[in-house]
Image: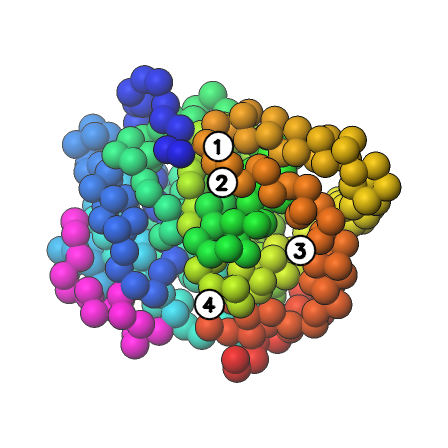
């Protein structure tokens, strides 16, 4: 499967600050850095909207403040000066800056990094992205062009499993993740663009919420009205049984706190589908497989894992019960105890 591409060249309209949290310099950093536009792309106009703390960077490509007037920029955000990516300080591409967010307290490392990036960003228009998928050469231009007719816009993730358990979860993630982002007004933090003024309760309230919770994109969805451009991005998921199980627990916990009614519906649906597969196996297996196959076809997912939808439905109730019973999960080398939406403890693994 390949990422869906726009059909025509996109025209850039406003400078964008791209936030990319990572502890290592990856291909995604180079891919996004190559797409940044300098002042000449915007007529050399003065930057109309500098964000707070724009000069508080830990390094830049030109050893200056890292942000040209009215230019795109990439902020690579890490947790600590000891992270491997920090070794690139002083050797960064043009218009790329390094931001050290610090250790999270009462929130996830990802949410803390995004909050720090929002503070440091020089432009009013902001895009978020991740380091675990391929960014084609016109990724930023297309996302930026989407903003003009749509306003805040998100692309759509397709989770591609790297281990047997992650592949087993693919049909559930296609229905509960890919389809949900596409139709549900949900922001995916891997590829979303918006402007500061789009945040309903203001940026200060948004950053405050980020620094007391776990999910960055769940929190953004609470503060932003967003629509989806149905370009899919293949996101690498898993790599080990333990990692895939922890991801499943984290995803279900995110929906539990940000969308409790949807979570209740998903539990009832999961139990109903499992019962149907047990009590009327021919009809149940056919229905569940056809549903997953239709979602795969809708988003051009060329993978045979939709055939795992029926066994996935049978195991969904015990897996969801396990995830809901868990009181902690591990993410990015930290253990999180997430008691309620704004009650988070960070513990050693």
User: In which image quadrant can residue 283 be found?
Assistant: top right
Q: Out of 104 and 329, give the one closest to the viewer.
A: 329
Residue at position x 51%, y 74% in the image: 334
Residue 104 position within the rendered picture, expressed as x and y whole percent measured from the top left: 49, 72
Comparing labels 4 and 1, the label whose residue is closer to the camera: 1
Residue 200 position within the rendered picture, expressed as x and y whole percent measured from the top left: 61, 42
Q: Is residue 20 found left or right of 89 in the rendered image?
A: right
Instruction: List the residue tagged with mark 3.
Output: 252
Instruction: List the residue tagged with mark 1.
Output: 301
**Mark closer to the chain start, 1 or 3:** 3
Residue 45 position within the rendered picture, expressed as x and y whole percent measured from the top left: 24, 33
Few, some or many residues within 10 Å of mark 2 (<14, 14–19, 20+): many
Whether 92 is among the magenta residues is: yes
Few, some or many residues within 10 Å of mark 3 (<14, 14–19, 20+): some
Instruction: List the residue tagged with mark 4.
Output: 332
**Mark closer to the chain start, 1 or 2:** 2
- Magenta region: which residues? 80-94
Q: Can residue 267 be spotted in the picture?
A: yes
Secondary structure beneath dot 1 equals: loop
Q: Is residue 103 above or below residue 212?
A: below
């Amino acid at each position: 499967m390949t990422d869906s591409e726009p059909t025509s060249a996109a025209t850039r309209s406003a400078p964008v600050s791209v936030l990319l949290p990572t502890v290592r310099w990856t291909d995604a950093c180079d891919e996004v850095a190559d797409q940044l536009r300098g002042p000449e792309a915007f007529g050399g106009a003065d930057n109309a909207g500098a964000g707070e703390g724009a000069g508080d960077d830990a390094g830049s490509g030109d050893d200056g403040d890292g942000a040209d007037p009215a230019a795109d920029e990439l902020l690579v955000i890490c947790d600590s000066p000891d992270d491997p990516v920090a070794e690139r300080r002083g050797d960064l591409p043009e218009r790329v800056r390094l931001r050290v967010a610090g250790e999270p307290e009462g929130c996830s490392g990802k949410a803390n990094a995004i909050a720090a990036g929002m503070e440091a960003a020089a432009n009013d228009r902001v895009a978020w992205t991740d380091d675990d998928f391929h960014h084609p050469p016109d990724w930023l231009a297309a996302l930026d062009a989407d903003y003009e007719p749509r306003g805040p816009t998100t692309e759509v993730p397709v989770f591609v499993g790297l281990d047997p358990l992650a592949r087993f979860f693919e049909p559930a993630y296609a229905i509960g993740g890919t389809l949900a982002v596409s139709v549900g007004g949900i922001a995916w933090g891997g590829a979303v663009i918006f402007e500061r003024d789009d945040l309903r309760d203001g940026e200060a309230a948004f950053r405050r919420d980020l620094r007391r919770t776990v999910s960055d994109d769940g929190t953004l969805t609470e503060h932003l009205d967003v629509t989806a451009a149905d370009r899919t991005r293949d996101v690498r998921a898993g790599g080990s049984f333990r990692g895939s199980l922890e991801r499943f627990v984290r995803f279900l916990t995110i929906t539990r706190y940000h969308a409790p009614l949807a979570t209740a519906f998903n539990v009832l649906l999961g139990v109903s589908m499992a019962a149907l597969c047990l009590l009327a196996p021919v009809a149940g297996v056919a229905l569940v497989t056809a549903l997953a196959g239709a979602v795969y076809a809708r988003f051009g997912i060329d993978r045979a894992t939709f055939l795992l939808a029926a066994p996935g439905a049978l195991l969904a109730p015990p897996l969801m019960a396990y995830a809901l019973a868990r009181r902690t999960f591990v993410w990015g080398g930290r253990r999180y105890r997430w008691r309620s939406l704004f009650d988070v403890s960070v513990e050693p693994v």
